Structure formats: C-alpha cells, structure tokens
Image: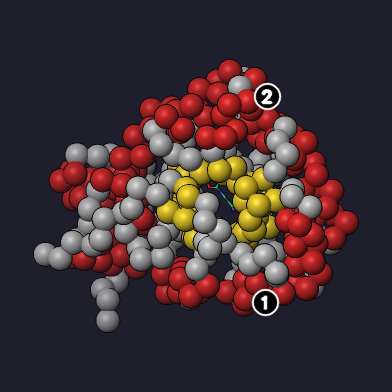
Amino acid sequence: MSQLAAVPATRTLGGSGIAVSPIAWGMWRLAEDGRSAADAAKLVHAALDAGITLLDTADIYGFDGAGGFGDAEALLGEVLAAEPGLRGRMVLATKGGIMPPLPYDQSSEYLNAAIDASLKRLKTDVIDLWQIHRPDILAHPQEVARTLDAAVAAGKIRTLGVSNFTTAQVAALNHFLGHKLVATQPEISPLRIDCFENGELDQAMQLGLTPLAWSPLGGGRLATPAGDRALQVAAALDVVAEQAGVPRSVAAYSWLMAHPAGIIPIIGSQNAQRIAEGAAALTVRWTREDWYAVLVAARGERLP
Ligand code: NAP
C-alpha cells in the first residue's frame, strides 16, 4: 500500500517566509466559562511547549450574542502582558470584519478601527497574520486591498489572510492587493469535505496560500459521532488511530495534514492535555487506501 508523504516539521505561511508549526491552536472558546488569565496562560504554554507555534484568535471570539466582543483577544493580551517572552514564541493570527449587530463590515473606516482595537487588546505592536473573518459583500475588493496594504505598510500587520471566502472572492481581493494573501481559512474536517472538490484547495495551491482548517473535528462532533455518516467516518478514522496508537481526534488532524495543499488544522480544544496530544498528528502516516476510505465514508457514497 502506498504511503502518503510525511508532514514536514514546519510549514511556511504562504510566500511570507514565516515558519509555523504544521498544526495550530485556536482560541474561539478561550474566554468561555470565565477562564482566568492564569488558566489561559497554561493553555498557551501547553500549545507552545508541544511545538505548536501558530495561534489563532479573532476580535469577535467571546461574543455570546449579547456581549463579550473582544474578550478572547483581551484574555490573550493579559497573558502576554504577564509574560512578555511568550509573544516571540508564537506566530499570532487574528481576524476582524464581523461587527455585531451588523453582519459584516469591511469599510476602510471600520477595518482601520478594528485592527487598532485588536492590537490594543492583544497588547502587541504587530499582528503576524490578520484575516478578514467573513466577506462583506458591500465592500469593493479594491478598497479593502487599499486599506489592508496600508495597514501592512504601517507595520501593524505582517501578513494577510481571509476566512470563509469563495474562490472568486479570494481571487478578486488578491488581484488588488500589493501584499498578497498568504492564508485562507475555510471550515474543513472529515465531516466537512466541500473544499476538496469545490476548488478552494486547488486555488490555495495555485496561489501558494496556506489553508488553515477551522473546526477540524466538526466542532467536536467527531468525538461523539451521531448519525450513520458520522459513525462511518469515525470508524474509518479509528482504523488508522488504532494502528498509530493515537486518539481519533489526532487521526482526524493527520488526515487533513496529509492533503498536498499543506492544510494546517486549528485545534479547538481548551484542554491542555488534548492540545499537547494534537501535536502527535505529524507522526501519523496515511496510505492512499486508508485516506480514501475516510473520504468515501464522508461522502456517504462510493467514488465514481
Ligand atoms: P474542533 O476541534 O472541531 O472542536 C473543538 C471542540 O471539540 C472543543 O469544544 C473540544 O472540547 C471538543 N472536543 C471533544 N473531544 C475532543 C477531543 N478528543 N479532542 C479535541 N477536542 C475535543 O474545533 P473548533 O473549536 O470548532 O474550532 C477550532 C478553531 O478554529 C477555533 O478555535 C478558531 O480558531 C477557528 N474557527 C474559525 C472559524 C472561522 O469562521 N474562521 C469558525 C470556527 C472556528 P474541549 O475544549 O473540552 O477539549
């Protein structure tokens, strides 16, 4: 059985030259349950100590439908203020462009204010990767590009990315940008396989964008699968998990990492042990047969 290529110990964020770990840690759920800065620091340490250097947050993380906008960034900012040495150990990614109660806002005025507010909350003078969280249909990509290029030129942002963009939206924005995109962040998991065939990953490879996979366990549904399809996917992942001696979650991350686009799954767990064990995903090797068995289970039908 032919084995797929091993995952490298580091990947480069698009064409930026910035090295990152092949798996990331996300802080969507960091500010939940009134977590203290000391407890948040333990999670940051768990990720960094396991060799996970790409850390992903967003200005809206912490928003619970009424309040909490900015809370996850602010909590990380507290961690960084208490232990300034941590900042240099991480590649810090955040996002903006969703402003409740407005759906999305990528006007120049809004983006400039959002980037400044993120810098202030994170207590840092530069964001390594700044991503547009969701596309604003009312913003012209040329205008968005002008704003973002200016933020890079001002030294507030090192590199640019997008999330939840269609391929056409990626192409339009990238066309106008002087500082080209380095990353795209779609939802990808063994339960969400659209991007394998809808052109998103092909475009990422063509443009040299690093794909960051959000909700790589389907928001945790892979841990407690319900329904025929999820159960079949879990069973196919378990075959490799058992062979490799890793939990199913780790097999799921490694399944994504085996894709030639160099997908970086963003671990969503806020449990120090699970974050650390996620790093083992780079040791898991897939055969073509086992990889396609998961895909077929995810499709719910045989390949043509
Ligand atoms: P996920 O990995 O799909 O789900 C994580 C959830 O699964 C956590 O609540 C975790 O709980 C639970 N879980 C249960 N068993 C687990 C196990 N064995 N191992 C690991 N987790 C287990 O990821 P996600 O949190 O939905 O998303 C990950 C990251 O993607 C976010 O932090 C964020 O950075 C990014 N994201 C981006 C967008 C976007 O629009 N760009 C949207 C959503 C997420 P415990 O904490 O108790 O382990």
Mark on residue 93? none
Q: Which quadrant of the structure image shows residue 197?
A: bottom left
From the image, tell me which residue sits under label 1: 175
Query: Is residue 161 rendered to the left or right of residue 138?
Result: left
User: Does residue 213 show up?
Assistant: no
Is residue 184 placed above or below 78 in the rendered structure? below
From the image, tell me which residue sits under label 2: 81
The residue type indicated by label 1 comes to: His
Estimate the x, y position of residue 221 in percent, counting from the top left: 42, 46
Is residue 85 placed above or below 120 in the rendered structure? above
Query: For numbered disc 1, what is the local secondary structure?
Result: helix
Nearer to the camera, 40 or 152: 152
Estimate the x, y position of residue 52 in percent, counting from the top left: 44, 39
Residue found at x 48% / y 50%: 19
User: Does residue 250 show up?
Assistant: yes
Q: Which quadrant of the structure image shows residue 62?
A: top right
Among all residues in the image, which is located at the extreme right? 109
Among all residues in the image, which is located at the extreme bottom? 304
Q: Which of the image's four quarters has the C terminus?
A: bottom left
Residue found at x 34% / y 34%: 277
Q: Which of the image's four quarters has the N terminus?
A: bottom left
- Which callout, 2 or 1, points at the residue further toward the start of the chain? 2
Query: Is residue 68 rendered to the left or right of residue 276?
Result: right
